[in-house]
Amino acid sequence: MDDGKSGEIGDGARKRARLIDVARRANVSRATAARALGNYGLVTKETRAKVLAAAEALNYRVNELARSMRSGRTLTIGVVVADISNSFFSTSIRAIIDTAASSDYQILVLNTGDDLEAERDAIRVLLEKRVDGMVVVPSSRSHFSHLQLEDGGPSVPIVLLDRYVEGLKISSVTTDDFAASREAVRHFVACGHRRIGLMVATAAVNGHSTKEPADIVWTAQARMHGGMVGLAEAGITPTHKWLRYSRGEFEHARAAAMTILKDEPRPTAILATNEEMAIGCISVANEIGLTIGRDLSLILFDDPPWVSVFTPPLTVIRRPTYDLGRLAMQLLLAEINGEGTYQAAMLRTEIVHRQSVLTLRATEVDRH
Amino acid sequence: MDDGKSGEIGDGARKRARLIDVARRANVSRATAARALGNYGLVTKETRAKVLAAAEALNYRVNELARSMRSGRTLTIGVVVADISNSFFSTSIRAIIDTAASSDYQILVLNTGDDLEAERDAIRVLLEKRVDGMVVVPSSRSHFSHLQLEDGGPSVPIVLLDRYVEGLKISSVTTDDFAASREAVRHFVACGHRRIGLMVATAAVNGHSTKEPADIVWTAQARMHGGMVGLAEAGITPTHKWLRYSRGEFEHARAAAMTILKDEPRPTAILATNEEMAIGCISVANEIGLTIGRDLSLILFDDPPWVSVFTPPLTVIRRPTYDLGRLAMQLLLAEINGEGTYQAAMLRTEIVHRQSVLTLRATEVDRH
DNA sequence: CCAACAAATGAGATCGGTCTCATATATCAC
DNA sequence: GTGATATATGAGACCGATCTCATTTGTTGG
C-alpha cells in the first residue's frame, strides 16, 4: 500500500533521499542504482548517467550506517585519551587524524581525564559503535581487563599510545622515557649538579605528594625511575627529599615546586616530566627570585614552541610526538588489515641542549 | 535451514554475540530479549534475569549501528576544525567533548588544515556517517554553500565556532575580536605608543604578505580591522607598513616579524593575533637584541599557561576558550532537540594586564 | 532460424536492533 | 462459566545499502 511515503514531491518536511528514491526517479532497481553509484558491476553508460542525474537532483548521500551494517566495517577509529587539551596529546591526535584520513578512516575522540571508570565507559561506547580499531592512552597500569578483548571471540584491535602496560599483550607505541630521564640526570651531573629535584606529573594523586601513588602510569614511573637510577649511577644517594608527584593543574604544580625550592639547601637543578610541571617550577622560581639557567637549572620533557624563545631558552627532552601518533595509527591500520603483529615500539628521545642548564665550576658546586 | 550459523559453541572464530544469540540462549524471542536489556515494556523478573545472564555469558554488546538505523539518531557529533594541535582549538574541543559526553554524544573530529576542499570533504563524510549535528570552524568567508544544508529537505544542524560567516543563517559562537583588537591598540596608545605593528595569523596566504588575502577568515579580518580603527581613532593614520599577514608556522611568523622589526623607525609595540605570531615576534626580538616589555611592547590573543611565567609576563587578550566550545555544543544540542533558534553569540574578551606593555614617557615617545 | 553466450538488470536475502501489533495466559467480576 | 482486563511474550515489518542469483535482452555463429 502506498500510504503516503516519501517520493511524493512538495511536502516540506520530506526525509533525506534514499537509494530507492534515486532508483525510482531513474526508473531502475535499487541494485542497478547501487551499481551505477558504486561504480562496480555492469551498467550501460546511459543508465549510469540517468542514475547519477537522479542522485544529483535528489542531493543523495549514501547512508554509511546501512553500508556499515552490511560490510561490517565502520571506517571509524576510536581514540581514548587522558586530556585532549594537553599539547602532547593534541599533537599526537593530529597525527592520528592525518594518518587515518589518508586511508579514509575517521576518528572518534573520547576524553577520560585519566579516570579509570571513564576509560571503561569509553571502551564500551566504542565497542557499541563498532569502531574498527582503537588507540588508547591507558590510565592505569594495573587495571586493564577492559582492554583485553580477545577472550570470548574476536573483537577489535587496540594500540596503546604513550604508555606501556606490563602484562597486556597489545601493541604499543611509547618513548624510552627511562633512558631519557637517566640521560637528563647524567647531563645535570656532568654539569656539576648534585642536588637534583624531580617533578613527576601524574593524575593518580591529590594535589601533590612525596610518595609514589599506588597506580602511577608507566610513563611517569619510567621517568621517575630513570632519574633515580641516573642519580645512583653518579654515586648520589637517591633521595625522595626533592622528589614530588603532582597533578598537572597550575596551582598544584606550583605548590609542589614550592615545597622543593623552599628547602634548605635547595636543589640546583630540576627535571620536570612535562610542560605543566616546568611552568609551575618557573612560576615559583620567578616568585622567590631564582633565575632559570643561573640559580636553577631546568630540563623538561617535550618541546612546545614557546620554550625555545623563553629567557633563557630551555633545554628539553624532545619526543617525536607527531611520529608517535602516526606510528600508532599505522600499526593499528596494519592490524585491522590483518597484516599486523604484536609490537611494542619504543621510540628514541633526544636532549635538545639550550641554555637552562648551568655548568657549575668546582667552587660553585661547593658554594651552592 | 540451520546452515551452521553461529550460536554453536566452541569454534574459535565465532562472531560477536547478537541479540538473537542472547535470545536463543535465554529461550525467549528477540523482542523479549530487547525489552529485558532495554529496560522497557513488560518483562517478568525471572525472564529479565535469564536474559541478562545470557547477555553476560555471551559478552553481548548492543550494536549501535543497527540501533541508529532504526532510531535515526547516531548520538554522534562531527567537529570540523582547522588544526586540532593548536591550543585554542584543542581547548575548545575539550569543552565540546565534555559537554557532549554529558548528554551521551560522542565526537568525530576532522581536521581541515584550513583547506576549503578538505572542509567540503569533511562535511560530506559527516553527512554520510549521519551525525546528529556538527560544530564547524569554517575555513572561508565567501565559500559556504556546503554549509547550507537546509535547501532540499531537512538535514543536520550546524553551529559555527570561532568564526562568523556573513550571509550564512547558521548559529555561531565567536568572540568580539574587533572590539578586542581596538581595545588593545587603545591601550598601546594610552601608554604612549604611536608606532604599532600588527601581525595577523591566516592560512590564506603563502608565507607572509603585506596585503590582505582574498579569502581571509572573519576572525582575522575583525582583528585587523579593529586594530586599524583603533589607530584611526587615536589620530594615527593607519599604515600597512607594519601590518603583516602570515601563516602560523614558526619560520613564517619569524620572517614576518623580521620584516617589521628591521624597519626604521621600528614600531614600539606589536599586536599579535595568536600565540604563533607572538612566538615568532619574540624570537626575532631576542635575535636582534630587543627586550620585550622594554624595547618592544607586545599584546597577543589567547592566554596559554606559559605566557604568565614568561619574562616579562605577557599582557594578553584572554578569550573564554573553554566556554566558547561549551556554548557551541549547548546551542547545537538545543537545535538537535528542536528547542534551538538561530543565534549568533559573541562573547566578550578581556585584556589581562601583565608586564609586556611599556608606558613611554613623553621624552621617550619622541626618542623612540 | 535457433543455439550459445554475453551483457544488463531485477528480485530478494541480509546485516542487527526496535517497535507495533497480535496472541497467549492469568486474574478478576458478575 | 463467560466476558473483561491486565500481563507477558512472540511474529514480523522496518531502517537503507549491498550482494548473490536468477532472469531478460541482445549478439554472434553455425
Image (cartoon, coloured by chain):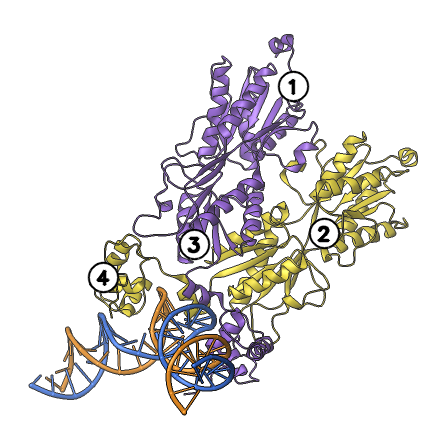
Chain colours: A yellow, B purple, C blue, D orange
CA gap between label 3 and label 4 equals: 25 Å
Q: In the structure shown, which secondary structural element does the residue marked by tag 3 occupy?
A: helix
The amino acid marked with disc number 4 is Arg
Name which residue lies at 55% across and 49% down. B99
- Read off the chain for label 3: B
CA gap between label 3 and label 1 equals: 49 Å
Asked if labels 3 and 4 share a chain, the reply is no
**In what quadrant of the picture does the C terminus of chain B appear?**
top right
Indicate which disc residue A25 carries: 4
Dot 3 corresponds to which residue?
B126
For marks 3 and 1, give the one nearer the viewer.
Answer: 3
- Read off the chain for label 2: A
- Read off the chain for label 4: A
Residue A309, percent from left and from top: 66, 33
Name which residue lies at 68% across and 67% down. A168
Contact check, label 1 and label 4, Cβ < 8 Å = no
The amino acid marked with disc number 2 is Ala
Q: In the structure shown, which secondary structural element does the residue marked by tag 4 occupy?
A: helix
CA gap between label 3 and label 2 equals: 34 Å
For marks 1 and 4, give the one nearer the viewer.
Answer: 4
The amino acid marked with disc number 3 is Leu
